[in-house]
Image: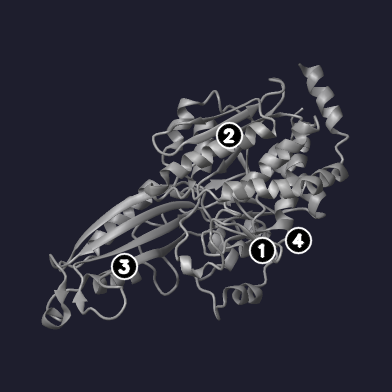
Amino acid sequence: MRRTFNFLLLTFNYFNMKDLKQYIETNKDRFLEELFGLIRIPSISSEEAHKPDMYKAAEYWKKTILDAGADKAEVMETEGNPVTYGEKIIDPALPTVLVYAHMDVMPVDPIDLWDSPPFEPEIRDGKIYARGADDDKGQGFMHAKAFEYMVKTNQLPCNVKFIIEGEEEIGSPNLRKFMEEHKEMLKADVILVSDTGMIAPDIPSITTGLRGLSYMEVEVTGPNKDLHSGLFGGAVANPANVLTKMLASLVDDNGKITIKGFYDDVEEVSPEERAEMAKAPFNEEDYKKALDVEELAGEKGYTTGERTGIRPSLDINGIWAGYTGEGAKTVIPSKAYAKVSMRLVPNQDNVKVSKLFEEHFKAIAPKTVKVKVTALHGGQGYVSPINIPGYKAAEKAYTDVFGKKPVPVRSGGSIPIISTFEEVLGIKSILMGFGLESNAIHSPNENNPLEMFFKGIETIPLFYKYYAELMK
């Protein structure tokens, strides 16, 4: 087996970037049309009406993986949405890479802000516009096409497994159990994920940390029915008024979260690491201009990069009450609602934080209302070291394609399942993303530059090359 391993590595040492570029150029129209077929499936995991679409997407991924050269692929059930699993085992003696991606996407509202239909991909100004163009159909599809190239040209230097899930956008509530039930099937040496971003098109970066997440819904109830605001205004507490005051009190004027015990487990990053983070290029004026804001906000004493990378945050993601239709309807609503997310840093436990939030929110409620708090989903934070073979392989791959060494960064985003992978499967994940901040993921007009899509397909094969070499 060792002889086979060495022979395959020797063969792969002749890897030619010119040949890969030519393969992409020859097949780029097919790549895009196949990606567009996946994007056209409205696989919104948070909406029950789209349950059939989750199975369509799972079957589409199955065919994609098989057509790319996998030995087998199948759609597997969970207690929620399906998972597509596939593999190509060329030699048990070789290292194994488990590729993770997700087939589900975010809802598209507000639909009127889209410049083109969200599930009808359109290329404008060198970018693919559609829901899922980046997150994560576009980035996931890079792996399918990179894998296809390596298999078709007999250059795959290691075993590859795929796990494509259908619930990432709702917190992967059923994937842990699936992993626990299929640990042997998912056994690998490293997990490779493209569901993150880069600092800029010409500044590659590797995400080494993710924030955790605690996502809550609150309901504030006042009177037992909607009331006439003239007859009852000033005499009965308005749940919408109460809710907005309660929400506003959750963060103080210095950007600190006021929930008792919230910061107890927050890891204080050393001055040395903060100094390294500060080396990442960042232009505050360009950042503000891109967002069309005059000033930035956040926790006092930290930079913008630190606020989103190493510090927790709390945000209202949705709020509603009373009459919101056209014209006027003068009512005091019976109920008011909000959705609140807390992004957490490593060492903060999302279950503990959810409990702290519930206790705090109920404690600050006046007796004029009743409060209900529900934890919807969440996950732990994640940190990956930069001295392991997987990181070094990714670093070399980016350097070859982009012409410069990637910067390690901690992302403000959350992929809750990443920490679960390490907990259940005992292996690290390499977050090798190609998205850009301007791609507007989760927002109207989500997009993905064609240049980045094709560069991703160029970079991923080099990861396999260098990873196999480092693992020999």
Quick one: label 1 or label 2, which is nearer the N terminus?
Answer: 2
**Tag shown at residue 278:** 1
Q: What is the spatial separation of the Cα atoms under label 1 and label 4, in whole angstroms? A: 18 Å
Question: Could you tell me which residue is drawn at 37 percent across and 60 percent down?
Answer: 340
Mark 3 residue element: strand
Residue 147 is left or right of residue 56, and the answer is right
Question: Could you tell me which residue is drawn at 42 percent across and 64 percent down?
Answer: 315
Quarter the N terminus occupies: top right
Vertical placement of 230 versus 394: above or below? below
Name the residue that disc number 4 marks: 202
Residue 295 is left or right of residue 223, and the answer is right
Quick one: label 1 or label 3, which is nearer the N terminus?
Answer: 1
Report the coloring of the rendering: one colour
- Crowd band around label 3 with a 10 angstrom C-alpha radius: few (<14), some (14–19), many (20+): some
Name the residue that disc number 2 marks: 62
Name the residue that disc number 3 marks: 320
Label 3 amino acid? Trp
Task: For the residues labelled 1 and 4, say whether their Cβ atoms are less than 8 Å apart.
Answer: no
- Could one spot residue 106 in this view of the protein? yes
Residue 27 is left or right of residue 251, and the answer is right
- Crowd band around label 2 with a 10 angstrom C-alpha radius: few (<14), some (14–19), many (20+): many
Mark 2 residue element: helix
User: Where, by quadrant of the figure, is residue 173 drawn?
Assistant: top left
